[in-house]
Image (spheres, rainbow, N blue to C red):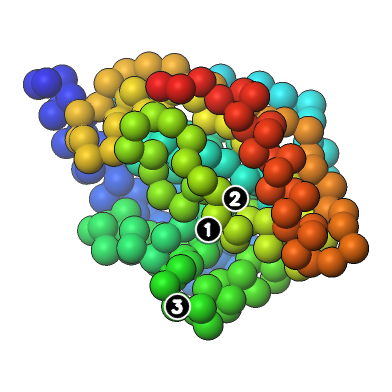
Amino acid sequence: MIASIIRLVVSTVVTFLIAIVAFVTLPFNRTEKLYHGIGRFWSRALLRICGVRVVLHGAECIDRSRSYIYASNHASMFDIPVVIAGLPDDIRLVYKKELERIPVFGWGLKWGSYIGIDRGRGAEARKSLDEAIEKIRRGASVLLFVEGTRTSDGRLQPFKRGAFHLAARAGVPVVPLTINGTYSIVPKHSLRIRPGTVDLILSPPVAVTGTSEKETEHQIMERVRSAIEHQYRVQ
């Protein structure tokens, strides 16, 4: 427990210092790649401090020259640094607006290049999806946690429509991303940090097909859930 407290304190200090750097560089972040680069540096520093190792599987499934929508399960607060550090792509996270209430970390999300979505307000949610489409058109990839919130028992939850609605509108392939191992590092409602290994598993992209937007959403969701269920390890 003492080691966990030390990791938490050091991680908080490092997050605060790197957040200051991120804020200072915001005026120079015209392509948004600088912000993501700082986010990747923060993520790797945090993982090293906490003794978390990330192993990527399936990198051959993606083409680095094109944009994707990554659809991932969500098991822990560590999912964010894990995917930023581990994915070999210039990604923009779509996150819950509630995370902006977290001091320092949430401020960095709010004022940076990532996309906050308020699911309780339809007009605001649509505006966030429009922003995501614009970023995709400029060459970035987008990542959404398709369960909407962290699992409370280590099992997969029902998927939300957001990622699949976005794919149907943007016409961009969806890459199923399975995260195994973060739940045991920091479960929901816990601040105790345990070192461990996380596996990021990329499955082949799911192409956008279907005769209507609704049919397309349904088809993509089924195929993505099947891919994640096949790779997911209950934690």
- Identity of the residue drawn at 68% across and 34% down: 226
In this picture, residue 79 sits left or right of residue 232: left
Three-letter code for the amino acid on which mark 2 is drawn: Leu
Taking 180 as reference, is 27 above or below it?
Answer: below
* Of the pair 222 and 84, the residue shown nearer to us: 222
- Distance (Cα) linking label 3 and label 2: 20 Å
Residue matched to label 3: 121
Q: Quadrant of residue 99?
A: bottom left
Query: Left or right: 13 with respect to 159?
Result: left
**Residue, far top:** 196
Residue 66 visible to an observer of this rendering: no
> What percent of the width, then of the height, locates residue 122?
51, 78
Dividing the picture into quarters, in which one does residue 191 lie?
A: top left
Q: Is mark 1 in CB contact (under 8 Å) with mark 2?
A: yes
Q: Nearer the viewer, mark 3 or mark 2?
A: 3
Residue at image mark 1? 94
Q: Amino acid at mark 1?
A: Val
Compared to residue 23, the image places residue 47 above or below, namely: above
Task: Give the residue at the far bottom of this rendering.
Answer: 123
- Image vertical order of residue 221 relative to residue 60, above or below: below
Q: Residue 159: give its label.
A: none
In the image, taking residue 127 as reference, residue 59 lies left or right, namely right
The tag earlier along the polypeptide, 3 or 1, is: 1
- Decide which of tag 3 and tag 2 comes sooner along the chain: 3
Between discs 1 and 2, the one toward the N terminus? 1
Q: Quick check: 78 above or below 16?
A: above
- Between 79 and 22, the one lying in front of the other is 79
Query: What is the spatial separation of the Cα atoms under label 1 and label 2, in whole angstroms?
Result: 6 Å
How far separated are the C-alphas under marks 3 and 1?
15 Å
The numbered dot on residue 143 is: 2
Q: Residues within 10 Å of mark 2 (few under 14, many from 20)?
A: many
Work out whether residue 104 or residue 199 is closer to the camera in this orientation and state it: 199
